[in-house]
Image (cartoon, grey):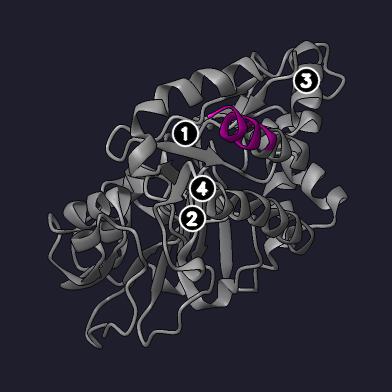
Amino acid sequence: MKKHNFYAGPSILSQYTLDKTVEGIRDFAGTGLSVLEVSHRSKEFVACINDTMARVKELLEVPEGYKVIFLGGGASMQFAMVPMNLMNKKSAYLNTGEWAGRALREARFYGEAVEVASSKDKMFNYIPKNYVVPADADYFHITTNNTIYGTELKKDPDVGVPLVGDMSSDIFSRPVDVSKYSVIYAGAQKNIAPAGVTLLIIKEDALGKVSRPIPTILDYRSHIKAESMFNTPPVFAVFAAQQTLRWLKELGGVKAIQKINIEKAAMLYDEIDRNKLFVSTIKDPEDRSLMNICFVMAEEYKDLEQAFVDFAKSKGIIGITGHRIVGGFRASTYNAMPVESVKALVDAMKEFEART
């Protein structure tokens, strides 16, 4: 039975990525060695990581004056590295969920971090609007997609201060105006690669402006100067990322995948809104995530929640249980999620309704 993988992360990777990565595990770049054992200083891997950084620049149309680097670990490390490298006295944060809140709390170790707006009052089920960013903030931080609650900022905001974006769960899902940002960061395990590597796009002239000493390994300039080789990078994850970016380019790039993502999300949201059993947790269509689609059972059918999870599993549909904070269901429809898998979930919802 075909499996339809809706896990929120680590999440589905394209079949191309899986196949090419398996090839690299057996024989990396014709070396006769596995990518799991090759030296990060070998000319073959240096070529791999340089090509991967170049593909990031090409796909996102990164302008001059920016550097692309890969760091080991997850995006949560950037909750501390961003203020450490960018904040002198004051920063501003938009609080749209759990991860945005964690980033805000970390920033307060380094100075005044202002919460300009929050959707916590309604369980993070909307994107705040009409907020004011302090003009004296060293930067304004946004989390573009909310994996737990299912909201997404689909446009790059215009603000009068440097912009920082945590794009961990929607990077490469849509075109991005990189020129609006000083730093973009993204953990790989949603739309890029296996867990273990974080992508950063950094505007060079945003650095070197803080007065505090920065530990060398936590200073972005160290990693830029060493071209992601300041310490041993996560070789396997970078190699897998290269395959994903190759696949994305062959597909037509971020504009092409955005069109597919809109189609997939519309298919599922339409069924949620139509089906008597289910209710979307996000009322405003403008705020609904294209990556993490959250919904619950209608109140009168709450006792059928586990029954639906079990029914879906019998159809090969896995990973739709909502985050423990929210409950209900979450279908993660990242770039690699095929349209036919979303259709399989929609068909299961219809069939379960007919049986009820």
> Of tags 1 and 3, which is closer to the observer?
3
**Number of the label disc, if any, that sits on residue 313:** none
Closest to the camera, between mark 4 and mark 3, is: 4
Examine the image and state in which quarter residue 107 appears.
Answer: bottom left
Given residues 144 and 166, the one toward you in this image is: 144
Q: Amino acid at mark 2?
A: Met
Sequence-earlier tag: 2 or 3: 3
Residue that badge 1 annotates: 231
Q: Residues within 10 Å of mark 4 (few under 14, many from 20)?
A: many
Badge 4 amino acid: Ile
Around disc 1, counting alpha carbons within 10 Å, would you say few (fewer than 14), some (14 to 19), or many (20 or more)? few
N-term mark: 1 or 2: 2
Q: Tell me which corner region of the image, top left, top right, bottom left or bottom right, holds residue 162.
A: bottom left
Q: Is residue 349 above or below residue 40?
A: below
Disc 4 and disc 2: Cα gap in Å?
A: 17 Å
Whether 355 is among the magenta residues is: yes
